[in-house]
């Protein structure tokens, strides 16, 4: 090998990165046994940034363009090396290239449900999925905080770190908002809006700019999904009431009737024990109506003189009322009727019992 070819091999005249591999965000120019020719050319393509690093310390940063490397274009490196302005010898320096292209269509999700504080349900556990896009916005921060002095740093490696930041930020953003989670679950654009601002700030601390963020789906745990379904049903079946909570109570009472009717000793048992032809629907209608409408004063009809067989009939009636009271109490204990329904119906039965 001649001296000319040896010199040509050892000195670099042009530094550039062709981005031959997809998904590489940071790449260090291979400098082992090489020196940069003073007056050499640095080619930085669009969507790239080049950073000169001297002994682990960031020196000069170059944006897109063709740059001639001299003491004038490398002021920080010149100062760190204490070069004279007329310095023109080859020099060594680490050169890192960063891709600033937008990384689009990146998927995110919660492999396990995350716990979020909510003003309606206190604490809930949810799973969510969506997509986001990002890019390197500050090569200095990205080098210092994430990539470091590695030969290459890939998209998959950075996204492993971003995933944890994303999930933690999402939990705190939704939990700290004044919007109920059920409202955000019904409006995924609203959920994305609540998260995106805080997430952009979190990414910026690492030199990463958040370009887009969206929520594609929200998966609720079974109990929360049931609560959401109940709220929707209450709006459909109990929405005639001005008070939403009253409508919701009416709906719960209505849905409890067929369940209780299937159980021995439930409402069906009460209907059999009445012995006066009172149907199940009439009994519950009277109980619910009494809970929603103030009871009007009722005139007590004068008691007619009892026939000779009256004492036996009265005793049977007393026994029937007592049995009805016991079964009514059983319904309350099972949660099939509200306390207001129980109190109003009990008052009517006691009025009949006392006379």
Image (cartoon, grey):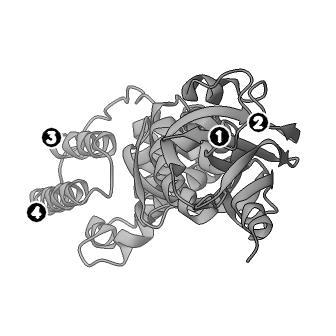
Q: Which residue is mark 2?
A: 62
Q: Position of residue 126 (x, y in %)?
A: 47, 57
Task: Measure the alpha-carbon separation of dots 3 and 2.
Answer: 97 Å
Residue 279 appears in the picture as rendered: no
Q: Which residue is mark 4?
A: 312
Task: Measure the alpha-carbon separation of dots 1 and 2.
Answer: 8 Å
N-terminal of the pair, mark 3 or mark 2, is 2
Residue displayed at 58% across by 56% down: 233
Could you say whether the residue bearing mark 3 is in a helix, strand or loop?
helix
Seen from the viewer's position, the closer of residues 199 and 229 is: 199
Q: Nearer the viewer, mark 1 or mark 4?
A: 1
Seen from the viewer's position, the closer of residues 166 and 32 is: 32
N-terminal of the pair, mark 2 or mark 4, is 2
Could you tell me if the residues under marks 1 and 2 are in contact, i.e. CB atoms within 8 Å? Answer: yes
N-terminal of the pair, mark 1 or mark 2, is 1
Q: Which residue is mark 3?
A: 354
Badge 3, how many Cα within 10 Å: few under 14, some, many 20+?
few
N-terminal of the pair, mark 1 or mark 4, is 1
Q: Position of residue 45 (x, y in %)?
A: 87, 49
Task: Measure the alpha-carbon separation of dots 1 and 4.
Answer: 108 Å
Q: Which residue is mark 1?
A: 52
Residue displayed at 76% across by 36% down: 62
- Would residue 341 be found to the left or right of residue 57 on screen? left
Could you tell me if the residues under marks 2 and 4 are in contact, i.e. CB atoms within 8 Å? Answer: no
Q: Nearer the viewer, mark 2 or mark 4?
A: 2
Task: Measure the alpha-carbon separation of dots 2 and 4.
Answer: 107 Å
Q: Nearer the viewer, mark 3 or mark 2?
A: 2
Query: Could you tell me which quadrant the N terminus lies in?
Result: bottom right
Q: Nearer the viewer, mark 3 or mark 4?
A: 3
Could you tell me if the residues under marks 1 and 3 are in contact, i.e. CB atoms within 8 Å? Answer: no
């Amino acid at each position: 090998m001649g001296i000319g070819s040896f010199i040509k091999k050892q000195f670099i005249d042009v530094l550039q990165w062709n981005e031959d591999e997809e998904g590489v965000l940071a790449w260090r120019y291979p400098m082992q046994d090489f020196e940069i020719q003073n007056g050499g050319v640095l080619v930085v393509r669009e969507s790239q940034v080049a950073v000169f690093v001297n002994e682990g310390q960031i020196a000069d940063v170059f944006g897109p363009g063709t740059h001639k490397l001299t003491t004038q274009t490398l002021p920080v490196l010149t100062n760190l090396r204490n070069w004279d302005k007329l310095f023109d010898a080859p020099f060594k320096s680490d050169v890192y290239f960063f891709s600033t292209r937008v990384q689009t269509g990146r998927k995110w999700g919660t492999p396990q449900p995350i716990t979020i504080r909510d003003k309606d349900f206190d604490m809930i556990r949810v799973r969510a999925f969506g997509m986001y896009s990002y890019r390197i916005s500050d090569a200095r921060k990205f080098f210092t905080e994430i990539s470091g002095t590695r030969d290459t740093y890939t998209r998959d490696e950075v996204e492993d770190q971003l995933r944890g930041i994303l999930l933690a930020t999402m939990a705190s953003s939704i939990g700290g908002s004044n919007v109920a989670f059920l409202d955000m679950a019904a409006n995924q654009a609203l959920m994305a809006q609540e998260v995106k601002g805080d997430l952009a700030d979190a990414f910026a601390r690492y030199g990463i700019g958040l370009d887009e963020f969206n929520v594609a789906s929200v998966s609720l745990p079974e109990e929360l999904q049931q609560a959401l379904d109940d709220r929707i049903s209450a709006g459909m079946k109990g929405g005639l009431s001005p008070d939403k909570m009253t409508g919701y109570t009416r709906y719960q009472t209505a849905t409890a009737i067929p369940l209780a009717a299937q159980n021995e000793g439930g409402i069906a048992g009460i209907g059999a024990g009445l012995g006066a032809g009172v149907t199940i629907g009439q009994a519950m209608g009277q109980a619910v109506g009494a809970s929603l409408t103030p009871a009007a004063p009722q005139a007590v009809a004068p008691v007619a003189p009892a026939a000779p067989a009256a004492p036996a009939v009265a005793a049977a009636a007393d026994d029937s009322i007592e049995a009805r009271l016991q079964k009514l109490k059983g319904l309350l204990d099972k949660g099939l009727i509200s306390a207001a329904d129980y109190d109003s119906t009990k008052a009517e039965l006691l009025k009949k019992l006392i006379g």
